[in-house]
Structure formats: structure tokens, C-alpha cells
Image: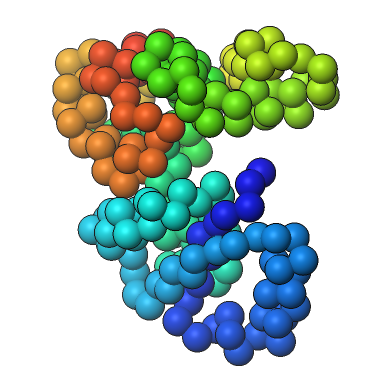
Amino acid sequence: MGTRFLLVTGKQSIESSELWPTWLNEFNQRSLTFKRVVIANEPSPQLIDSIVEQHRPFSAEFVIGIGGGSVLDAAQAGLGSVHALASPLGAYFPIPHGEVCGTLLAIATQVNIEALQERDPESIALSKYANIGRLMADSPDLNDLQARHGLLNILHDWTLHMKLPRLSQYGIDTDFFTKIITHCRGSSMKTNPLVLLDSEIKKILSFRL
């Protein structure tokens, strides 16, 4: 999973917990290093953007959120292209957030992998996708290419098996693509493995239309 992470907490609650010393000791024993992000109020998109920029040099590999609603909202921000597209789709159409994320996950993962292989083949994200593929397929001997291919097969199979809705079922068509793409480039898209081109985002939307 990695050894560097952002720890998102409330202003005081975590330090007053009797478990705080135990957690710190556990982090040390596992050679984990973290930067703490304190959320005192409702996290605005501007706040999330500033946190992303402030901690980008740290190259956090995962995020842990401990606290209430505002803390968890902040911890879940920056989830990549799927979450970024869920924001305008949910704002302009009556589609539940979970259904957006579910129906776009497989194709968004595919587009990310294809874009990385073409434009950033040395990206660590490709290795991470491969590791996930080996775990999900329970096949540790797969090479990276086989593992990524297996991951995509599993995700596309899930989409079909769960009969996840197509975007057109909620009144979405190509006429809205420009508006959707324009409004999907917030903090979540900025933390995608790479910045997707408009044509790549359009491919994601078109595939699930």
C-alpha cells in the first residue's frame, strides 16, 4: 500500500482519544510516516485544493480520515476521475452518487491505464493497478500487463453482473458532455494518476451512455 500517508483529523478530537498514543506507536513500528491535516470546519473545494497543493511534494500514497462528517468529506476528496465526474453528473441530473461511481469505475480505470501507458509509462500508478489486479484475481504470479488486463476484466464483469445503469437512463446525452467536462476538473480530477484530456473524459462518458 505504501508508507507515506495523509492523516485527516478534526481539530482536537484525535489527540484527546486514549487510542492516540497506541496509533502513533503502531505507525512507528510499521515505519509509516504521515502529515497531519486538520479540518476545523466544513471543507470547501478551495480548502481541498489548497491541501492538495500544500502536500503534493510529500507524495502521499494513501489517506486515512479519523473523525466526523467534515473530516471524512475531506479525506474522501481527491478520488480521481470517477469522483470528479460524479460531482457535475449529480448536480445536473437525478443520478445517485454511488451509481455514478459504480457505472464509471471500469471504463475510467481502463482509460487511466491506457493514458498512462501512452503518456507516462514509468508512472508508479501502473504498478499499483497491476498489484490490485493480482490481489483481485488471487494470482500473484501474473506479470504487470496480465494483472492490469485481469483487473479491467473483473471491473467490466462487475458492471454487467450488477446491471449498473447507463447514463442515458438519467437523461444524459452527448449534448451535455461539454458542460460536464468543464465542471469535472476540481480537486478530485487533480489527484487522478494523470490529467485526462477532454477526449479521454468524453470516452468515459460515451462508453456508459
Q: Nearer the viewer, residue 137 or 94?
A: 137
Q: Position of residue 73 (x, y in %)?
A: 44, 59
- For the point 75% across and 60% down, which residue is it? 30
Q: Position of residue 36 (x, y in %)?
A: 49, 69
- For the point 77% across and 21% down, which residue is it? 137
Picture layout, residue 143 above or below residue 170: above
Residue 203 appears anywhere in the view: yes
Residue 161 appears anywhere in the view: no
- For the point 50% across and 51% down, which residue is it? 60
Q: Position of residue 58 (x, y in %)?
A: 44, 55
Occupied quadrant, residue 86: top left
Q: Nearer the viewer, residue 165 or 72?
A: 72
Picture layout, residue 86 above or below residue 154: below
Quarter occupied by the C terminus: top left
Q: With 67 as the anchor, is 118 left or right in this view? A: left
Q: Nearer the viewer, residue 32 or 182?
A: 32
Occupied quadrant, residue 202: top left
- For the point 37% across and 29% down, which residue is it? 194
Q: With 28 as the anchor, is 125 left or right in this view? A: left
Quarter occupied by the N terminus: top right
Q: Nearer the viewer, residue 56 or 209?
A: 56
State how many labels appear.
0
